Amino acid sequence: MRPLAVIGNVNVDLILGPTEPWPVAGTEVIVDHDELRVGGSAGNTALAWTALGVDFQIAASVGNDQFGLWLRDAFAGQSEHWPVEPSSTTLSVGITHPNGERTFFTTRGHLPLLSFAQVQAILDTKRLHGGYALLCGTFLTDSLRDDYEAFFDWADANGIDVALDTGWPLDGWSEQNRAAAAGWLRRSHCSLLNEVESTAVAGCSDAVEAAHRLKAMMRPGAIVVVKRGPEDVIGIDADGTLVSVKTPQVKVVDTIGAGDVFNAAFLAALCAGNSLETCLSVGARVASQTISTSPRRYGEPDTLSKLETLS
């Protein structure tokens, strides 16, 4: 098994809902569900790996408040060297809707302060040699993003492959943001963007065409995945072969973090030496289980081996 790490955004999610239509200003709405839980792309990935029994490292930070203490406790054993930033902890309030979609209100909080120097201090570089580092929450971790060239240089120098999930830019997919994402992809070994992100960066409307365009941007032997929600997930293998896998159809409870859970299961299967088709299938099945259960289930330590056998 190749070693794994995730780098990026861990924050607090407060999930409320469902509600529809959107409330009128000045009114109060009673909802049936509330849940306070670990969030952020890196946090969701780490939760999934923990449930699946995958060994990993995580580089993140927290704010200097009660939420920061709570997050550190949630990752006891992993968070010992996380920096405590001179800021409140980032909080996302997610309002869910009856169709399973959601709307987020997020504070800036501590996330922009995580730096490359801090990431280096947290990770055991020697132990990560030959493995994959998932870089996520790119448009939220401002200080780290400013040093991405140094980050990619460090990864290359230490034999670490980078998987990239940009997330959604706060100011949308401007030409500047598209160019930045394309630059990061050129140095990445695996693209894990969803369909909207992939087509935005590629500058086209078709998911398959976008996958091919992203593949052309990236280094030789790179893998491209386009996550498409309930639709077939597609990927392009290192040799250029296009692969498509059906996503299980489930009754959706909560889609928050679905893409992050897919990333976790996909990379775990990939680092175990499985084919791209198997990795896509494992990612889709684990993510489908997560979004259709409450309390949500990420799987168990033997889930990966079971799903690999079924693929």
Image: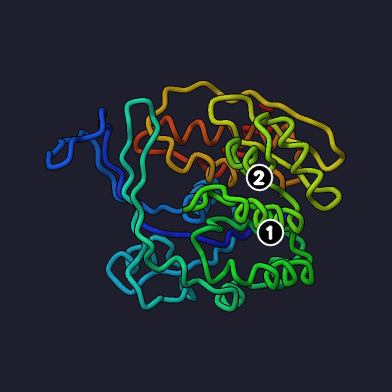
The colour scheme of the drawn protein is rainbow
Give residue 5's position: percent from left, percent from top.
Answer: 62, 60
> Is there CB contact under 8 Å for labels 2 and 1?
no
Q: Quadrant of residue 96?
A: top left
Q: Amino acid at mark 2?
A: Val
Q: Judge by depth and name the residue closer to the eye, 24 or 38.
A: 24
| Residue carrying label 1 | 3
Residue that protrudes farthest toward the front in the picture: 175
x 25%, y 42%: residue: 34
Residue 79 circle label:
none
| Residue carrying label 2 | 201
Q: Judge by depth and name the residue closer to the eye, 13 or 5.
A: 13
x 58%, y 72%: residue: 119
Quadrant assignment for the C terminus: top right
Q: Amino acid at mark 1?
A: Pro
**Cα gap from disc 2 to disc 1, whole angstroms:** 29 Å
Give residue 6's position: percent from left, percent from top.
Answer: 58, 59
Q: Quadrant of residue 196?
A: top right
Taking the image as shown, residue 290 lies to the left or right of residue 295, namely: right
Q: Is residue 136 above or below residue 142?
A: above
Secondary element under disc 2, as helix, strand or loop, is: helix
x 55%, y 76%: residue: 118
x 60%, y 70%: residue: 146
The answer to whether one can see residue 38 in this image is: yes
